[in-house]
Amino acid sequence: MKKISETFNTIKQAAEFSGLSEDTIRYYEKIGLLPYADRKANGHRTYSQYQLEAMIFLTRLKATGMTLEEMKHYRKLSEEGPTAIPKKIALLKKQKERIQNEVSRLLDTQRIIDYKIDHYNDILFNPDIDDSNCDPIE
Amino acid sequence: MKKISETFNTIKQAAEFSGLSEDTIRYYEKIGLLPYADRKANGHRTYSQYQLEAMIFLTRLKATGMTLEEMKHYRKLSEEGPTAIPKKIALLKKQKERIQNEVSRLLDTQRIIDYKIDHYNDILFNPDIDDSNCDPIE
DNA sequence: ATACATCTTGGAGTAGACTCCAAGTCAATG
DNA sequence: CATTGACTTGGAGTCTACTCCAAGATGTAT
């Protein structure tokens, strides 16, 4: 039932695939955010498809505002095996909530921007309006 | 037609209202992101309601991922007066688009998290599943 | 008058997340 | 066999956005 990918990639390919830079990948390994990568005979890193997906997942978590420390914590739980699954679920739910808040805030801001755009358009097409003191960022 | 607020606030109150720290407010003034604040006779800064709103607007722009430099640029346009309004509209639209992308990405990530939560729940309530190699963040 | 709080200034220090570099290894190509 | 290119390492440097500090001025309460 195991599915282990047989294609192995260089750090360059990993960078291309994940969107991380080679330096960043090495850096993540250095700080323990990515596991120590297997090396070829000559010492070069190799990555399986499976590890590439882990990188993608990391970039996604990061995109939600998770810090590297938090991601490390998550990874640590993964190492604990199945007993840590409830903790991981809790963490994921917390993160989901954070994203929800973030989205709300963004939509909120978008509304404010819309309001401002409208407002500026009013000024442009209706030069009578004098509100030189109404725009809270002059 | 002008509406100028008559209540003036200390930096402490400005911090409370805006959510920025006092240090951050001074810092923003120092780098030219906030205009040089009026001082009382003793040199202490004062802020009108109107300036407080400007701070709130800044925090909102910041929350959308704008850098301080970009916000400075926006403020500079405001100083140019009405002729810069089209530029400001363009900037706001660009930022709105960025927010839209950000929201899409977040919702995307939320879906991935949901998928993962489901997946872990499956494992918890269905211990037969062996996927020790299927979770791309071991 | 003395203590305390609240502010001022310039400048130094910090945290997080990279990003770059020098010196070296190894494999393939001309 | 010399060069080129892709990689390795440890460590230093950079950027952003704060955050903290020391020394000093002023205002208010006891």
Image (tube, coloured by chain):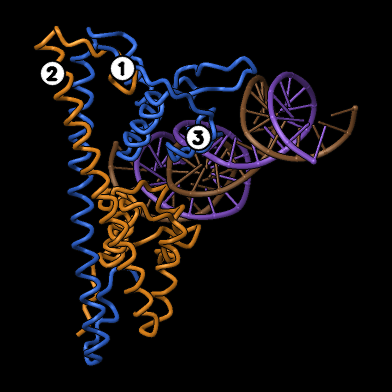
Chain colours: A blue, B orange, C purple, D brown
On the rendered structure, is A89 left or right of C13? left
Q: Residue at x 23, y 42 (%)?
A: B108
Q: Quadrant of the C terminus of chain B?
A: top left
Tell me the kind of residue under disc 3. Answer: Gln
**In which quarter of the view is residue B91 placed?**
bottom left
Rendered view: B75 above or below A7: below
Residue that sits furthest to the left in the current view:
B125
Q: Residue at x 62, y 14 (%)?
A: A41
Q: Is residue B40 above or below residue C26?
A: below
Residue drawn at 30 percent across, 68 percent down: B93
- How crowded pointer 3 is (Cα within 10 Å; few <14, some 14-19, many 20+) is rated as some
Instruction: Find disc 1 in the rendering and name its residue.
Output: A3
Residue A63, how many percent across, how many down? 33, 40
Alpha carbon of mark 2 to alpha carbon of mark 1: how far? Answer: 21 Å
Please give the residue where the numbered disc 2 appears in the rendered image: B121
**Front-most of residues A130 and B83:** B83
Residues at discs 1 and 3 both on one chain: yes
For disc 3, the marked residue is: A13
Tag 3's secondary structure? helix
Give the Cα separation between the discs numbered 1 and 3: 21 Å
Q: Position of residue A113 (x, y in %)?
A: 24, 65
Specify the amino acid type for callout 2: Asn
Quadrant housing the N terminus of chain B: bottom left
Q: Nearer the viewer, residue D8 or A129?
A: D8
Read off the chain for label 3.
Answer: A
Label located before the other in sequence (1 or 3):
1
Three-letter amino acid code of the residue under disc 1: Lys
